[in-house]
Image (cartoon, rainbow, N blue to C red):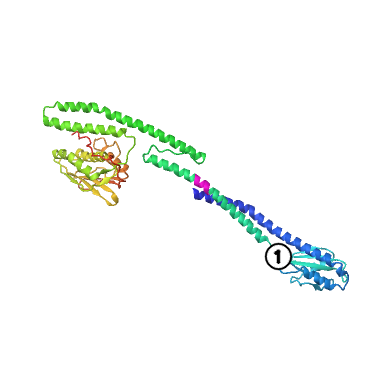
Amino acid sequence: MRRRLLLLTAATTALVLTALLVPLTLLTRSHAADRSLSDATARAQWVAHALGPVLATSDERGTAEQTVESVNGKGLPVTSLVLGNGSVIGPRPTVKAEHAVQLARTGRAFTFEPEAGGRIVLVPVHGAADGTAVVRVTLTERQLYAGMMTSWLVLAGIGVGLVLLGLLLADRLGARLVGATRRLAGTADRLAAGDLSARAEPEGPPELQLIGRELNRLAGRIDELLDAERENAADLAHRLRTPVAALRLDAETLRDPAEAERIGTDVAALERSVDDVIRKARRPLREAARADLAAVARERAAFWLPLAEDHGRALGIDAPDGPGVPVPVPADELGAALDALIGNVLDHTPHGTGFRVSVRALEGGRARLVVSDEGPGFADEGGEFERGVSGGGSTGLGLDIARRTAQDAGGTFTVRSTGAGAEVTLEFPAPGPPPGAGSGGKPSGPPAPSG
């Protein structure tokens, strides 16, 4: 916008100056010609007045020659005296104008424009002994318009100065507009990144100030709505504590101690998940997260291993040890996404179908998580998995949870049938700087399967 404003100002200023300076240049040209002609006419009249008494006697030729010589010089118009007998005193002009001289002998003083350019001023001298003499002053084209180029350069300098001044003012105005617009965009970017404390400083022209105030009002409204949503989510999660407590009491009344312990463990995991939901819902903003994808994959694979063995399934885990594979996703969200994918395998493939969880560190700090199975594959190969819609009789949320986990972190989510089963791939970008001390934690277990 700043460049366009400068171009518009330059074009507008140039058009206005052209409309003003073209007539001025023509006027200066005419003024220079008028000034030169006035000087030449005054010179010719002075010579005629000075030589009038001298030419009345025929023996004063020497005086006439001295007078004519005194008004000639380098760079001056050529002045000569044409006597009545046709002889010339002074420099002989190169441009012939006998008919104009004859006309001047009739007593008329005038200016003549020859075909070669320039001007010739003719002034008659009456009372000469041998007839009317004529004072002739010849101006070349250059002498006629002397000083015109200087005037044109002055006008050109004024024009350039005005254009530069206009560009300077336009640049300052553009810098103000662009700066205010960029600051508004920066505030919008911070809001989009989750910083709901960002507010714009209304500045610039009234229109931008209005946008800044409306952006601040929108940010405040978003903050209010998110607060309400967090409270609603926390309230809903809190309501789950009552049926969970009832389940725990029912588990304690079971006669089989092993069964009671197994169900009690599952209920405890469910209680931890409900508490996590409440804490997460009451968290004011999403904080920068970082988790070890390999560690989460091993932990969740170990969690699901007993159920897989009960179904006669082979569970493979391929995750590197050592420094791990960091990704910019909270550990609980990674665990929830992995649980959703494993749960889909358990729910939608026959008993005895094996599956594998693989974690790979890619170039540039990126990471890949692959959950593959040996089942029948996806019925809708390459189709879109819409949230809440399932072709297998479930809620349709499992794949969508995994998809949002990857895409919210800036990664990708793909599914495909390999011919030997199904494969779901999540790729994550490189994480940012590690968060401060105390921000990390051991992954907590999502809810146990309901069986």
Residue 73 at x, y = what percent?
74, 69
Quadrant location of residue 81? bottom right
Q: Is disc 1 placed on a helix, strand or loop?
A: helix
Res. 414 in view: no
Of the pair 415 and 103, the residue shown nearer to us: 103
Of the pair 371 and 129, the residue shown nearer to us: 129
- At label 1, which amino acid type do we have? Gln
Query: What residue is drawn where x is 78% and y is 70%?
Result: 69
* Residue of label 1: 143
Q: Main secondary structure of the magenta part?
A: helix
Of the pair 280 and 93, the residue shown nearer to us: 280
Residue 70 at x, y = what percent?
78, 69
Res. 229 in view: yes
Of the pair 244 and 314, the residue shown nearer to us: 244
Categorize mark 1 by other alpha carbons within 10 Å: few (<14), some (14-19), many (20+). some
Q: Which residues are magenta?
A: 171-176
Tell me: 322 left or right of 109.
Answer: left
Based on the picture, tell me whether residue 137 belongs to the magenta stretch. no
